[in-house]
Amino acid sequence: MKKFYGAGTYVQSAGVRNDLEIDGFCVAVCEELGVEIARHRSRSFEEMEEMGEVLSSFDVVVALSERSRDLAARQTQGFHTDLEYWPIMDPTAKGEGREAKLDAYRAARDQIIAQITAHWGDPEEHEHR
């Protein structure tokens, strides 16, 4: 999101749980697009809230799994926050061998990019504003 649309939109990522490290396959397929996430750390919704980031304060929450959708729905209930569910394929159990796994992660990455650009438009149009 930040790569395509810049810093004009406030974006945070969170998940159902926090992991200590970002998956190496995620790092590799993002680097292919010039996006460095190796130092990124995933946060849980609870950890975000402890940091002062309340889900209900966001205009849009995008859930990529059923579990995150259900949790976000509970945490934003009664607030004017749009909740979107983008059922993205989970690549973690796909593929045998490095190249097959990378292909699965690329497919998931490309699904996310397609959803982002379908929702927020052509990134190149935003560069000229």
Image: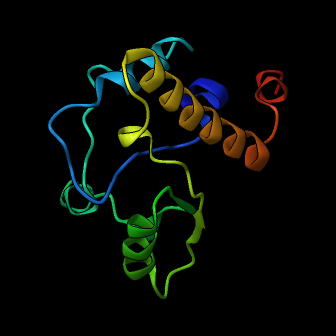
| Front in this rendered view, residue 58 or 105 | 105
Where residue 77 sits: x, y (%)?
A: 45, 85
- Residue 39 figure quarter: top left
Colour treatment of the image: rainbow
Residue drawn where x is 46% and y is 69% of the image: 69
* Residue 73 in view: yes
Occupied quadrant, residue 91: top left
Residue 116: percent from left, percent from top: 67, 43
Which residue is the extreme one toward the left? 20
| 27 over 115 or under it: above or below | above
| Residue at 81% in and 23% down | 124
Q: Position of residue 64 (x, y in %)?
A: 50, 55
Q: Quadrant of residue 96?
A: top left
Identify the residue shown where x is 43% and y is 38%: 94
127 left or right, relative to 62: right
Q: Does 8 sit above or below residue 10?
A: above
Q: Is residue 118 left or right of residue 51?
A: right
In the figure, 79 relative to 15: above or below? below
Q: Residue furthest front?
A: 96
Left-right relation of 96 to 122: left
